[in-house]
Amino acid sequence: GQQLNQSPQSMFIQEGEDVSMNCTSSSIFNTWLWYKQDPGEGPVLLIALYKAGELTSNGRLTAQFGITRKDSFLNISASIPSDVGIYFCAGTALYNQGGKLIFGQGTELSVKP
Amino acid sequence: DTEVTQTPKHLVMGMTNKKSLKCEQHMGHRAMYWYKQKAKKPPELMFVYSYEKLSINESVPSRFSPECPNSSLLNLHLHALQPEDSALYLCASSQAFRINQPQHFGDGTRLSIL
């Protein structure tokens, strides 16, 4: 089935550094979502994107819906220890049934104080 | 704090037991979902309910039986589970089962099968 390619798989950074991760698809997507999951908790929605080219911020987080509609990136500026967790991209593909989400494999972020 | 509430938070059961997972949301959402998640992997869709009717069953074994008693509640009945069914079970909801309606997740039930 359809998969999203999310990279990198893991990142080890120093507190204060900026972070960038992205997702790509071979098919056109009409929604891109970014979630963060902490250990023992469910994924929390960070940013939702609905239009090609859309750039949206949520505090230190910024995400963009790629112009080709086949990719999206998430940037985190000035990372802090509580940014640690697994970040998942997800989206709905043009050919999909309704709101069925396809997930990337996740980016595990570790922040060293 | 999540607006999708799941109980119990942890569940340990034997392979012959019958148990149920519960999910509740009071956001007026009309679509609800069950996902299974293994450690450090993305959630895998199991079932979708739209307006209290089963809309999608992702070829889930019959030992998992979903139920949607009303628009706020979603249950997952478990019977004769296997050790490989041990996982985090997540419930999610969205305004509707449509492309521009993001899903919001609960914190899950950690299920262990002995």
Image: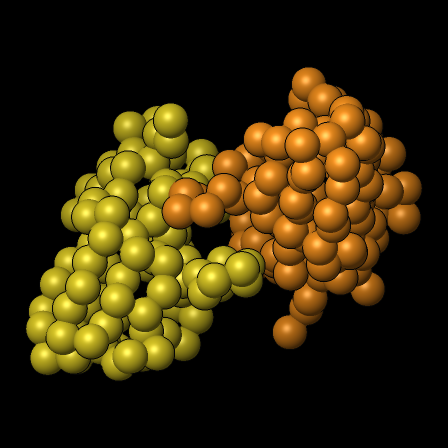
Chain colours: A orange, B yellow
Residue at the image point whose x is 36% and y is 58% from the top: B88
Q: Position of residue B17 (x, y in %)?
A: 9, 73
Number of labels in the image equals 0
Q: Position of residue B101 (x, y in %)?
A: 54, 37
Q: Position of residue B1 (x, y in %)?
A: 38, 26
Would you identify the image quadrant in which residue B86 lies?
bottom left
Residue at the image point whose x is 46% and y is 46% from the top: A39
Q: Is residue A60 above or below residue A95?
A: above
Please identify the quadrant where the C terminus of chain A is shown: top right
Is residue A106 visible in this depiction of the protein? yes
Would you identify the image quadrant in which residue A14 lies?
top right
Residue A110 relative to residue B97: left or right: right
Please identify the quadrant where the N terminus of chain A is shown: bottom right
Residue at the image point whose x is 58% and y is 31% from the top: A82
Residue B29 relative to residue B39: left or right: left
Q: Is residue B1 above or below residue A94?
A: above
Q: Position of residue B55 (x, y in %)?
A: 39, 59
Q: Is residue A31 above or below residue A6?
A: above
Say which of A52 and B63 sits in front.
Answer: B63
Residue A109 relative to residue B16: left or right: right
Say which of B93 and A38 sits in front.
Answer: A38
The residue lying furthest to the top in this view is A59
